[in-house]
Amino acid sequence: MLRLMGRLRRKFWLLLGCGIAVVLIVMLLREREPRYEGHSLDEWDRMLESDDNPSVTNAERAVQHIGANALPFLIKWIQYEEKPWRRHLETLCDKLPDQFARPLNKLMADHGFDRQQGAFSALYILGPKARPAMPTLVHLIQTDPLNIQQSMTVLAGIGGDAFTPVLDVITNRVSPHRLVAINALFELDRRRPLDQIVVSTLTNCLAEPDPELTFRAAQILCYHNLEKELAMKTLVDGLESGNARIRRQAISSLRFSLQLGYSISAPLEFVQDTNSPLSPYAAGALGELADRAKMPETVLPALTNALHDPRPLVRSYAASAVGHFREAAEPAAPTLLELWNDPNSSVRQAATNALFELPTYAVLRTVAQWPMGMSDEQMLMYEQSYGLPLHTVEVTNLLNHPDARVRQIATTAFRMLVDRTMTNANHQP
């Protein structure tokens, strides 16, 4: 009996020692994980997928600082696979009542997927320094369809010979992932130059029968200021397609290319050139740019002049673009009002929408959009949110407008305001 107790005691101490050793090993492994400014690589890695912009910026700086020391961990993390038993338990938890399922799911939460996606982002940030990850990334392209896009994007970010597996997919006409591969090139910013073999592959794509692939290749070339004339010709040719879907894709691609592939002066010249097929799309691009950046003083006058262009499509796009300038475009109101008589319905609609974007006239649309049949509580909320008395003053200012149509709309709006104000007053206790 004593001998048996001695054996059990020895086994207990042996197991305890093994347990302590495992804990120490885990702690040492964690300690070896690179750190920066008090956070581990794992913590920075998951911050890359955060919705908080400052956190993402700090995490990018941390990854750049850690550099190549992060690679062993990042390469391991991108190969994450959720364990079958975890998926099975999650399925079982979903069948439980919510008050039990929620805490259990939180308890079993696995951050492996977040870490994986952050690792892809970190490798992309490292760029050419991530070259040791190439074999793993190529393997993931072949075996992990859920992460093909991320793997290819990282390879494109590495550059050099890492472009090869991406280009192999693009040039393989039977591959179902060609668009995914070309989108990986689309993600590259201008600071990462394209090799000549990449430019040649993209140029060859301009002759592909797949318009989505073709237009994406044209966008990339324009964005990187390469073969722009040929790329723009491809997009312009798409405008002449008999297929409405292809025309829409061409228009969208043109506007993107004009916004990001050229300085402001180029689309401005297209707008002013009454023979250019790019005039309407250049006007649209300038309007969208006005939402994001301060435009040169020459842009709004050029768009206002384009409201008289002999081509209806240009007048329509120019009117929409003028609306993006809002308060600065107030002097263009008379010209927009003239377009209410335009023979083309698209021009009339664009001019009307643009006019209602101008602060002086915006109240007319605001009042017209208020729902009828509101309850007392809803009426009070609208009064507090929008300020009925304030809008009454704004509408009153338009009752003597020189254009009879504006006066008519303002009169209708004024009556709506008065009716709603009186209805609200009558319901007050």
Image (tube, rainbow, N blue to C red):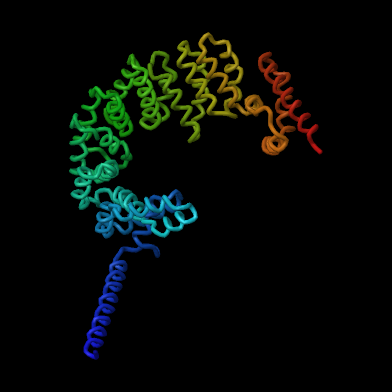
**Compared with residue 176, is residue 318 higher up or lower down, i.e. above or below?**
above
Instruction: Give the number of marks.
Output: 0
Residue 421 lies in what quarter of the image? Answer: top right
Q: Position of residue 113 (x, y in %)?
A: 34, 51
Q: What residue is at 67 percent from the left and 27 percent from the top? A: 372
Q: Position of residue 306 (x, y in %)?
A: 49, 17
Given residues 36 and 171, the one toward you in this image is 171
Q: What residue is at 21 percent from the left and 40 percent from the top? A: 163
**Compared with residue 34, is residue 425 higher up or lower down, i.e. above or below?**
above
Given residues 248 and 362, the one toward you in this image is 248
Residue 268 lies in what quarter of the image? Answer: top left
Q: Position of residue 423 (x, y in %)?
A: 77, 29
Q: Is residue 385 left or right of residue 246?
A: right
Q: What residue is at 37 percent from the left and 18 percent from the top? A: 244
Q: Is residue 416 left or right of residue 314?
A: right
Residue 369 lies in what quarter of the image? Answer: top right
Given residues 191 and 29, the one toward you in this image is 29
Q: Position of residue 183 (x, y in %)?
A: 30, 36
Q: Answer whether residue 45 is visible to the viewer in this image.
A: no
Q: Answer whether residue 351 is visible to the viewer in this image.
A: yes
